[in-house]
Image: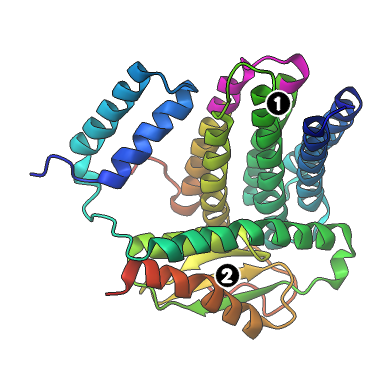
């Protein structure tokens, strides 16, 4: 029971927890624009945590350092905002209703 | 025609190649550098402007701030998702832009999506303002001020100062 | 400790995939379904990474990378379709 295992357990639990919270936000929030926040932020960070955990795990097994997980992490962190922006733009284009505030501005 | 049109892109491509192969063997290094040289050379029509980073230290500090903010913002978003959805105050916020270059604007939009409970929704046709949706913004002016001071100012300094 | 943590993580991520799938089925609008599909892709990546750790095999990494790529391209194409009513202009 060394330090690496504690770190790994923490990263895996945090990653899975954030992933779950992201999907929970997608399932229970009221309108499309608020639903967008869960998957873009929480899920991305959750999978990021899991990928870092995988990197630590394979590096700690003694076959040299394993860094290619970083590539997927970087890719996700670059693409998630782009998808979110496009989805928000499409929703505005279709004029989906928004709860609270002044509602969505006209296209 | 320049022999090395985009040194930063070349370096990034070589690094990605090494990560993809998960090895730093000399052969892979040579192949990575070769690809990093050839790909920007053959695709230079798609990359009209050379990226200039004026203040690397400011950029590094921005990346540090961003990583910290991503974790903090996620904890905040997680708390709001788990809390009562009726108590949220979602709002659209119009953020006027001082940035002019494409790269800086897209970086700002990405930053906004990853951090403080906001998603960038639409860039105005004249590129002077960005429409942002905030998950919980009781005070839209504060959100706007935070985005401008915390993310836009360093980006402007890195990519557009003379 | 890992043998205790990994099943919990599997359960959480599977629950997340289930919630995304529910949103995919229930809609109500097209962007909602696209968002749910995108989240489902990312949840699958999480499941694959967990499976890789569980089985101590690095083989699943390539699959995760491919799903990430295809998921992004798919989401962008679907959004473009909603925005323009056409993908190839």
- Percent from the top left, x then y, of residue A44? 66, 45
Please give the residue where the numbered disc 2 appears in the rendered image.
B132
Please give the residue where the numbered disc 1 appears in the rendered image.
A57
In the visual, does B131 lie left or right of C47? left
**Do labels 2 and 1 touch, CB within 8 Å?**
no
- Percent from the top left, x then y, of residue C12? 85, 36
In the visual, does C85 lie left or right of A30? left
Residue at 33%, 39% (x, y): give it: B11
Residue B109 visible (yes or no): no
Within-10-Å neighbours for mark 2: few <14, some 14–19, many 20+ = many
**Was residue A2 drawn as part of the magenta stretch in this picture?**
no
> SS class of the residue under badge 1?
helix
> Which mark is in front, 2 or 1?
1
Q: Based on the displayed image, in which of its 4 quarters is residue B33 positioned? A: top left
Boundaries of the magenta span: C53-66
**Was residue C60 drawn as part of the magenta stretch in this picture?**
yes
In the visual, does A27 lie left or right of C1? left
Query: Residue B99, relative to residue C82: is it above or below?
Result: below
Residue at 88%, 22% (x, y): give it: C3
Q: Tag on residue B51?
A: none
The chain that hosts pointer 1 is: A
The chain that hosts pointer 2 is: B
Outermost residue to the left: B1
Q: Based on the displayed image, in which of its 4 quarters is residue C88 positioned? A: top left
């Amino acid at each position: 029971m060394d330090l690496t295992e504690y770190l790994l357990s923490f990263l895996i639990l945090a990653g899975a927890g954030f992933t779950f919270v992201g999907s929970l936000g997608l399932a229970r929030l009221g309108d499309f624009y608020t639903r967008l926040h869960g998957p873009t932020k929480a899920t991305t960070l959750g999978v990021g945590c899991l990928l870092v955990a995988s990197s630590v795990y394979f590096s700690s097994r003694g076959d040299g350092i394993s860094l290619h997980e970083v590539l997927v992490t970087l890719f996700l962190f670059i693409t998630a905002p782009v998808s979110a922006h496009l989805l928000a733009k499409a929703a505005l284009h279709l004029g989906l209703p928004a709860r609270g505030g002044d509602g969505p501005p006209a296209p | 025609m320049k022999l090395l049109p985009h040194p930063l892109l070349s370096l990034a491509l070589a690094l990605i190649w090494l990560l993809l192969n998960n090895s730093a063997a000399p052969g892979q290094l040579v192949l990575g550098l070769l690809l990093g040289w050839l790909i920007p050379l053959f695709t230079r029509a798609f990359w009209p402007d050379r990226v200039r980073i004026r203040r690397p230290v400011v950029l590094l500090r921005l990346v540090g701030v961003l990583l910290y903010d991503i974790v903090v913002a996620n904890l905040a978003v997680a708390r709001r998702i788990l809390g009562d959805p009726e108590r949220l105050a979602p709002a659209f916020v119009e953020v006027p832009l001082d940035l002019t270059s494409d790269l800086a604007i897209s970086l700002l939009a990405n930053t906004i999506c990853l951090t403080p409970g906001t998603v960038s929704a639409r860039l105005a046709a004249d590129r002077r303002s960005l429409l942002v949706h905030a998950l919980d913004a009781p005070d839209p002016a504060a959100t706007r001020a935070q985005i401008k001071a915390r993310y836009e100012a360093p980006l402007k300094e890195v990519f557009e100062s003379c | 400790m890992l043998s205790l943590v990994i099943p919990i993580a599997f359960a959480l991520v599977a629950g997340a995939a289930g919630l995304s799938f529910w949103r995919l089925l229930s809609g109500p609008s097209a962007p909602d379904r696209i968002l749910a599909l995108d989240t489902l892709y990312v949840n699958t990546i999480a499941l694959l990474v967990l499976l890789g750790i569980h089985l101590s095999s690095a083989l699943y990494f390539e699959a995760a990378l491919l799903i990430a790529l295809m998921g992004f391209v798919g989401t962008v194409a679907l959004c473009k379709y909603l925005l323009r009513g056409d993908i190839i202009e």
